[in-house]
Amino acid sequence: YQGIETGVGNTRYSGKVDLATARSGSSYTLTDDSRGGHKTYNLDHRQDGTGTLFSQDNDTWGDGTTSNAATAAADAAYGAQETWDFYKNTFGRSGIKNDGVGAYSRVHYGDSYVNAFWDDSCFCMTYGDGTNNSDPLTALDVAGHEMSHGVTSNTAGLEYSGESGGLNEATSDIFGTGVEFYANNSSDPGDYLIGEKIDINGDGTPLRYMDKPSKDGGSADYWTSSVGNEDVHYSSGVANHFFYLLSEGSGAKTINGVDYDSPTKDGSTVTGIGRDKALQIWYKALTTYFTSTTDYAGARKGTLSAATDLYGADSAEYKAVEAAWTGVDVH
Ligand code: ASN
Ligand code: ZN
Ligand code: CA
């Protein structure tokens, strides 16, 4: 017998989840033939090679703790699965290249490696295990962030420096957040924080905040003429803040138990249009109007063109895009 199975993942961050797996005879592997054949491999602390495909004689993966090597694999497989489904069901996009082909994921990269990364050359995702190998970088928003680098690379191709680099990073934060809300997982509910589950600062605070990016101590809340000189993970703040304002509006709000308070540069009020429409506008702009050299002024133009295409030039959505960019001082 060979076929697609529904296994169980006991993840570190997302509780107990269904995982699409493959069975061949009495052996199961972390292979998802319902989503382009995505596979999850164990690097077992190496830093090169593909690693070993997760394989075992039962279909329950991990035990929720990092002492079990398959736990991070369950998170990574779940992240790949939800990211695939988010793109398919939100935008009709079939995989990172829209060609129906799945990527692959590698977990347990290096020793106490505190990062995760997408690599175009292997068309693969890689996750470190975090500080003391005990906080793997496999949370849903991180997985969605990294795989979205593959989407950006295969669409607008935003160069990873200057303002286009900030837009590239923000695109990953925006869609990583989209994945987290899409998954609607009770252990990791949707929020406008990035990396809130992986304890990257050691004090429980998230890596980034979309409502007010400067809360991380480095990111830009508003555009300035020098924002393109900053690290792309900081210049992204302007677009992350735009996306929050467009989705949820300015001011104070509590969503899924998290408090937000999003300011505008000039004190103006922005009325949000909801995350679903904001995601459609960003995706249309990324895949239709943005190019490798799009800067913040170009992103304003591109998202306004996208809003016109989707909702009309006289729409409330178009006006909200204008207001949200104005709120972050992009004109
Ligand atoms: N995790 C980082 C990111 O996706 C890796 C990098 O710096 N490119 O932004
Ligand atoms: Zn990134
Ligand atoms: Ca998050």
Image: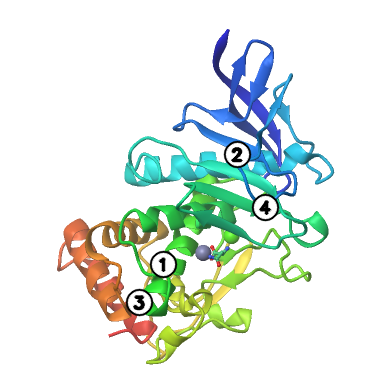
Q: Residue at x 54, y 81 (%)?
A: 219
Residue bearing mark 3: 324
Cβ of mark 1 under 8 Å from ligand 2: the answer is yes
Query: Image check: 29 left or right of 308?
Result: right
Q: Which quadrant of the figure contains the C terminus?
A: bottom left
User: Eyeballing the image, is 228 above or below 2?
Assistant: below
Give the residue drawn at x 46%, y 32%. 35
Residue 207: x, y in percent? Answer: 63, 70
- Numbered disc total: 4
Residue denoted by label 2: 77
Q: Give the label, 2 or 4, closer to the camera.
A: 4
Q: Amino acid at mark 3?
A: Ala
Disc with the residue nearer the chain's start (1 vs 2): 2
Between label 3 and label 4, give the one nearer the viewer. 4
Earlier in the chain: of badge 1 and badge 4, it is 4
Q: Earlier in the sequence, mark 1 or mark 3?
A: 1
Which residue position holds label 1? 168
Identify the residue position indicated by label 4 in the image: 47
3 or 2: tag closer to the N-terminus? 2
Mark 2 and mark 4: Cα distance apart in space? 19 Å
